[in-house]
Amino acid sequence: MLTEEKEDYLKAIYSLGGATEYVSNKQLAQYLKIKPPSVSEMMSRMQKEDLVELKAYKGVKLTHQSQLLTLNLIKRHRLIECFLIQSLNYSWNEVHAEAEVLEHRVSDRFIERLDEMLDYPRYCPHGSLIPRGEITEEKMTPVNELTEGTSFVLKKVRDEYELLAYLSKQDVSINDELQIEKIDHANKVIYLKKKKSFIISFENAEKMFTR
């Protein structure tokens, strides 16, 4: 049976690249903020259900069956985020937690009707593609790989509350044009500018993307 806990594991493996490559238990433990032994136990159980492929010293990878299940979960999550922003006036840093709860509670019929009502959106509020039957993550360039003086359009931000809340305070959102004013390697921060300048850490710059 696919419990909410197992669904969260599937999404975590997918987010870490587990659709095409192996993800270590350590990576999963850090991502989910749980102890490695708990991850190992769950991976053994999920292997028996053909949800993951286990390989010694490499980690786990999604099976074909679990890829389809995971893409459906991601579609649900991202459509609910669109609905919360468009219809209920949520901010982009508020929708993730709500969608985490609702994605496990609503029926497939509800998601189909929601998709139709929203006119089949292509992207979620954070710039990620909404999957429709296949792996559809676009190749994008993280901001930390850009050079000083570069202007770029922000196309995607990792769905993390603190980062999204900070960007909201700077009046920054998807499709805004930003410029890299300065890269401070000593302090590991980047000075970005929209109308005014603000600072982003190297770590957070890895979670912001452009095409």
Image: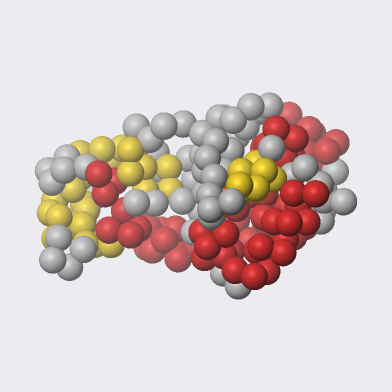
Numbered disc total: 0
Residue 30: give x, y in percent of width and height.
52, 65
Left/right placement of residue 114 relative to residue 123 reads: right
Which picture quadrant has residue 28?
A: bottom right
What scheme was used to colour the molecule? secondary structure
Whether residue 135 can be seen here: yes
Residue 90: give x, y in percent of width and height.
59, 56
**Residue drawn 61% across the image and 43% down it:** 61
**Residue drawn 79% across the image and 34% down it:** 113
**Residue drawn 69% across the image and 45% down it:** 52
Q: Name the residue nearer the viewer: 194 or 184.
A: 184
Residue 17: give x, y in percent of width and height.
52, 43
Q: Is residue 61 above or below residue 93?
A: above
Q: Is residue 211 above or below residue 185?
A: above
Which picture quadrant has residue 101?
A: bottom right
What is the quadrant of the C terminus in the image? top left
Q: Name the residue nearer the viewer: 181 or 146.
A: 146
Q: Name the residue nearer the viewer: 159 or 125.
A: 159
Which picture quadrant has residue 199?
A: bottom left
Residue 24: give x, y in percent of width and height.
54, 55
Whether residue 117 can be seen here: no
Q: Is residue 107 above or below residue 191?
A: above
Residue reaching furthest front? 56
Residue reaching furthest bottom? 35
Left/right placement of residue 149 relative to residue 189 reads: left
**Residue drawn 52% across the image and 40% down it:** 21
Q: Name the residue nearer the viewer: 48 or 63.
A: 48
